[in-house]
Image (cartoon, rainbow, N blue to C red):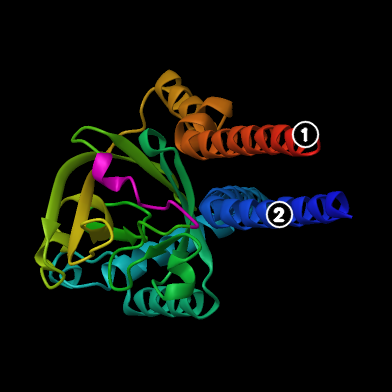
Amino acid sequence: MKKNKKKSSHKISVILMGLGIVLGLAFVLYPFFSQLYYDYSFNSEVDNFQQELKAIDPPELKKENVKKAEAYNEALEPNLRWIDPYSEKEREEGVEIYAEMLQVREKIGVLNFSKLNLILPIYAGTNENILQKGVGHLEGTSLPVGGKNTHSVLTAHRGLPEARLFTDLDQVEIGDIFSAETMAGELFYEVDQIQVVEPTQTDTVKIVEGEDYLTLLTCTPYMINSHRLLVRGKRIPTPPKEVVEKIKVEQEKDFMYYLNMYGHYFLIIIITFLLVFVVLVLQKKKMGKSSI
């Protein structure tokens, strides 16, 4: 009778321990599985956008849309004070098209940053729904189609447990290269300025006459978010083919990428199972001794 009670209490303790381990692992590993899910989601969105670009027919429609984006950029201050090649009608059409994109939160491009292993969809607007699932284009700044007198600003969260997004933006250095792929093609930028500013300091993202800039913006310090980290890139010619190919290879998320990025989670799993194994062996020995 006593043996049966001991066995049943042992089973209950094992079940409770198992449940505790499962719940503990689920809590600890939630960011890991969430980030894997978001990685898959981002890749799907990027693939969809690239397929949609290829499917645009006729090809002239792509050029027409780029022209409307350029007209929208010309409608921004202080561009109107400079030479404006677009008519009032074209500018109005550009603004209307962008307004439509804001309503449907349409994808407008892809951000590639090989150093950070980032390949993220770019959406029109910066509301919370967009910033939870990718990079937002800051309304009122130039659309990322390039050209003189433009300054696009792309923003994303950092420190989210479920998605990395711009978490590692503070690792960027002067001279790093990133790109924005839109209907205008893939445009490359070299980081020429990194700043931490107050949220109210907007001069740093203004249009500079004759320049083509793209700034990546996120909150800083990590988890405090009292300031803004601005990583500005200056447009450069498309790098040689072999350099672009190297960048693309570096962006491939192979086993080593996941090991480097999430190795601590694998370590937690291994240590947990080792501890469980040791506890079970010790309990079995204890049960064996008590039954003698």
Residue 72 left/right relative to 33: left
Separation of marks 2 and 1 at Cα, in angstroms:
16 Å
Q: Which residues are magenta?
A: 162-171
Badge number at residue 28: none
Quadrant into which the N terminus falls: bottom right
Which-is-in-front pick, marks 2 and 1?
A: 1
Residue on which the image places disc 2: 13
Q: Position of residue 222 (x, y in %)?
A: 26, 56
Crowdedness of circle 2 by 10 Å Cα count: few (<14), some, many (20+)?
Answer: few
What amino acid is at disc 2?
Ser
Q: Residue at x 77, y 34 (%)?
A: 288
What amino acid is at disc 1?
Gly
Placement of 59 over or under 281, stated as above or below: below
Q: Residue at x 36, y 32 (%)?
A: 238
Task: Tell me whether circle 2 and circle 1 mark residues in contact (CB < 8 Å).
Answer: no
Badge number at residue 288: 1
Question: Is 83 one of the magenta-colored residues?
Answer: no
